[in-house]
Amino acid sequence: MQQSASLLRLPRLSATVTASALCAALLAGCASSPPAPDAATLIARAEQALGGATASTLSVTARGTGNTFGQAFQPGNPWPALNVSQLTRSMNFETGAMREESGRSRAEPTGGGAVPLMGQGELRAVALVREGFAWNQAGPNAAPAPIAVAARQHDLWLGTPQGAVKAARKFNATSGTRSVEGRTLNTLSFTVPGAFAATLVLDDSHTVSRIESTLPHPVLGDTAVVTTFSDYRDIGGTLRFPMRVRQSIGSHEVYDVTATQVTVGTPVEIAVPDNVRAFRETASTTPVADGVWFIAGGSHNSVAIEMAGEIVLVEAPLYDGRTLAVFAAANALVPGKKVGTVINSHHHFDHAGGLRAAAGEGATLIVSAAAKPYLERVFANPNRIAPDHFAKSGKAAASARIVGYSGKHVISDGRRTVEVHEIQGSVHAQGFNLVWLPKERLLIEADAYTPGPPNSPPPPAPNANNVNLVQNIERLGLDVDRILPLHSRVVPMSELLAAIGRR
């Protein structure tokens, strides 16, 4: 205290000199970090450095490695590794459209997704977006994919530096600076309403070295995405393009690819199919037993089960749009009874994508013990870019009722019993659940068995997931009459046995 008092008694001249010196130091510091040029100047410099400013289309083909986003074997683990034999994106920045053609095969045996099991070939897929519509194309058939709109717009605008700079101009970016390894680099930041927010980091040569973006997601909420560009080369005297592109989503890598072909100005004509433009989520209910309904109408099914005081719903899939349609259908089945409990088959994002919406409706969520801490953590993430049903409900993350179980969980009202069992030994997921109705002899499962079309022959070799499901049915001693799969159609147990070579 005495030392502080003596400082207060310094002569006024010394205090003035000290203040002047401090101001000079601050001014010197400011002089060493000049403010960023305005956004228009930065965009113009980047356009000149990268080329392609006047071109409305760009096509890039690459290959390398990737990962199946949202399909981790264990909750919170890295996404399953893939080999990417082809990744071709054809983009039209004028119409806001992109066509992606890909070939992917597994590089590790565990984890989910539509990619064939390890060593059984690759998945060839065609994915498209135009403005606010997304769909998948299989031959002449277009399957609406509204859940993918924001992510595909993100890929269209931020998958290449040229697209990113066009987006910065289109969406009125603001300029800034960032210190990176002792250097001050310029940045451009902007938001595409309802889709994503992005910050472009420009290197000393005015090309884009890194993009940090935030993407809304039905499970993760606002999700961090980092895309890096390196190994820039001149392409045909018109472009300067990065031959290597890496991207991570939610702290885990999703691809690391090297460009093999880049073309600019090639026509890219993409029209939205009529059925995609007219698509609305619908949920059809079919009774399969007294007080049990199969809810179909989309790529993912659900099952409603009447209990004494509520409806138990098995699966809240995909995203708000699908799950809220399922809730509406289930809530209309029995006067005076609403969905109060939701059983989740497993943590993969296509099957857990409606859990936030279910929590927003006040339902109790029954999940695996492995998924419970993960879901509690991600429920705390905000969804500010595209507020979802949970965010709009005003409920706090801590209010979500998430019940984790291990081995077996039973719901009973004295009249009906619903059992939840862990599927053990699967390569698809840990914390993988089936639901068993012993009185009705109905088995409900997802991804362990997806029936083919009626009268289709069994696969040439048994699917490991199908075999594993039969092993678990036998381990648990379940006398199954029918299977209610959460993909495809209701089938007798005999079809599953035929699929693994048993008659």
Image (cartoon, grey):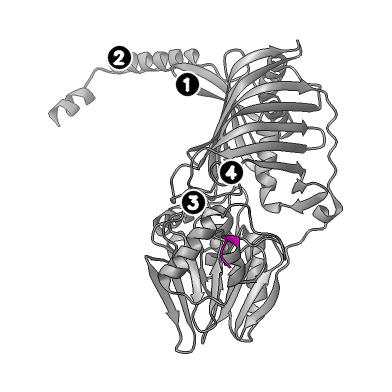
Crowding at dot 4, Cα within 10 Å, few <14 / some 14-19 / many 20+, comes out as: few
Whole-percent x, y for residue 113 in the image: 57, 49
Quadrant of the rendered image containing residue 211? top right
Q: Nearer the viewer, mark 2 or mark 3?
A: 3
Quadrant of the rendered image containing residue 394? bottom right
Examine the structure image and report whether residue 478 is included in the region drawn in magenta. Answer: no
Q: Is residue 211 visible?
A: no
**Dot 2 corresponds to which residue?**
13
**Dot 4 corresponds to which residue?**
120
Q: Nearer the viewer, mark 4 or mark 3?
A: 4
Q: Earlier in the sequence, mark 4 or mark 1?
A: 4
Q: Nearer the viewer, residue 71 or 55?
A: 71
Q: Is residue 446 visible?
A: yes
Residue 180 is labelled as 1
Single out the residue that lies furthest toward the bottom: 415
Q: Is residue 227 left or right of residue 329?
A: left
Crowding at dot 3, Cα within 10 Å, few <14 / some 14-19 / many 20+, comes out as: some
Whole-percent x, y for residue 375 in the image: 45, 56
Q: For numbered disc 4, what is the local secondary structure?
A: loop
Give the position of the C terminus as an image quadrant: bottom right
Q: For numbered disc 1, what is the local secondary structure?
A: strand
Task: Give amino acid for label 3.
Answer: Asn
**CA–CA distance between discs 4 and 3?**
37 Å
Q: For numbered disc 3, what is the local secondary structure?
A: loop
Task: Give amino acid for label 2.
Answer: Leu
Tags 4 and 1 touching, CB below 8 Å:
no
The span shown in magenta is 499-503
**Dot 3 corresponds to which residue?**
381
Q: Earlier in the sequence, mark 2 or mark 4?
A: 2
